[in-house]
Amino acid sequence: MLVRLLFFCGLWLAAFSAAAMTIYKSTDANGVVSYSDRATPGAQVFVFRDRMVEHLERQVHLDIQRQRGVDTVFVRNELYAPVEVELSFGGLSNVSAAPKAPIRRVLPARSRTRLALLTASRLDQPLVYTPRFRYSLGDPSGAAQTYRYPLPWRGGPFRLTQGADGQYSHFGPKSRYAMDIAMPEGTPIIAARGGVVVKTENSQTGRGNNPAGNFVRVLHDDGTMGVYLHLQRGSLNVREGQRVAVGSPLGLSGNTGNSTGPHLHFVVQRNTGLGLVSIPYQFNQPVSSLPNFALGKP
């Protein structure tokens, strides 16, 4: 199984250099999943989708206080990071002075903010409306500062197996400038830049239900965020709200989520307006010149 997975990591290098590659996914009688660039009986074309979604519903949500004839609409942000929100109302009935345009704000970390006050036109009738609520991590007003990232792991050397605009999976807005580095499971992963841990996942086994697998998201002082994905279950050394420095241990590399081989997926993102996108970055040494662990040769 490990050999098969490592072989597929090697395919990423080809995908990075080729214009396109068709990947086939097959499952044998024992339930073992394999990936290959060759079609075999029963295999299906594997289509990667940019599904890196962090579910924040329990940490960013509406909080509506109701009194007779008045609804006060708050937004509660329980994250250790600012959040940009947009709130509007539809399906209005018996509501006076409702905002005509969407309300867009950046809410501070760990805050509760009033965004709207809705009053009834007739006190003997209920207020009827449908909130439309969108949000995204981060403050879009900041400017990313120039920074060269030290390698976010200890050990190696390891090699890049898929880089920016990789045809296999690095083409969506959240992953376009990500880098995949093949490495054995259990490799120590460290912070490549200081900041505050704002989101973690530590309980997924194998494919799990989140394409990112187990991960750590760190908010940097300039508003950008470094995300370390596909980590080993139960290996995280940090908690949300903790400040980390360059070199602080975060966890161990793994093969969880939408991962087709043991590797670290490292991406730097920022909010550009109600949406996270990956942004270009550079390591402080050329990863492409290192030996290729995935192919087992220099």
Image (cartoon, rainbow, N blue to C red):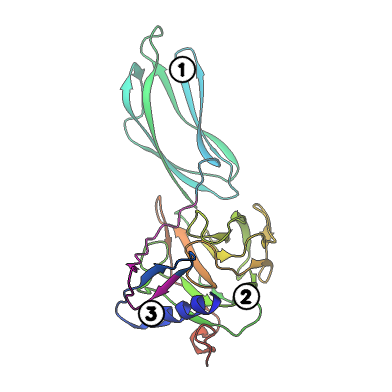
Where does label 2 land, which residue? 153
Between the residue at mark 2 and the residue at mark 3, the CA separation in whole angstroms equals 22 Å
Tally the marks.
Answer: 3
- Given residues 109 and 260, the one toward you in this image is 260
- Given residues 261 and 89, the one toward you in this image is 261
Q: Going from the N terminus, do you reach mark 2 or mark 1 first?
A: 1
**Secondary element at image label 1:** strand
Where does label 1 land, which residue? 70
Q: Nearer the viewer, mark 2 or mark 1?
A: 2
Q: Which residues are magenta?
A: 34-54
**Residue at the limit of the structure toward the top, as seen here:** 124
The residue at 60%/71% (across/down) is 192
- Given residues 266 and 82, the one toward you in this image is 266
Q: Amino acid at mark 2?
A: Trp
The residue at 41%/8% (across/down) is 123
Q: Is residue 144 visible?
A: no
Q: Amino acid at mark 1?
A: Val
Between the residue at mark 1 and the residue at mark 3, the CA separation in whole angstroms equals 57 Å
Q: Going from the N terminus, do you reach mark 2 or mark 3 first?
A: 3
Q: Position of residue 110 (x, y in %)?
A: 60, 43
Between the residue at mark 2 and the residue at mark 1, the CA separation in whole angstroms equals 54 Å
Where does label 3 land, which residue? 16
Q: Amino acid at mark 3?
A: Phe
Q: Going from the N terminus, do you reach mark 1 or mark 3 first?
A: 3
Cβ atoms at labels 2 and 1 below 8 Å apart? no
**Picture layout, residue 206 above or below residue 107:** below
The residue at 67%/54% (across/down) is 239
Q: Position of residue 236 (x, y in %)?
A: 66, 61
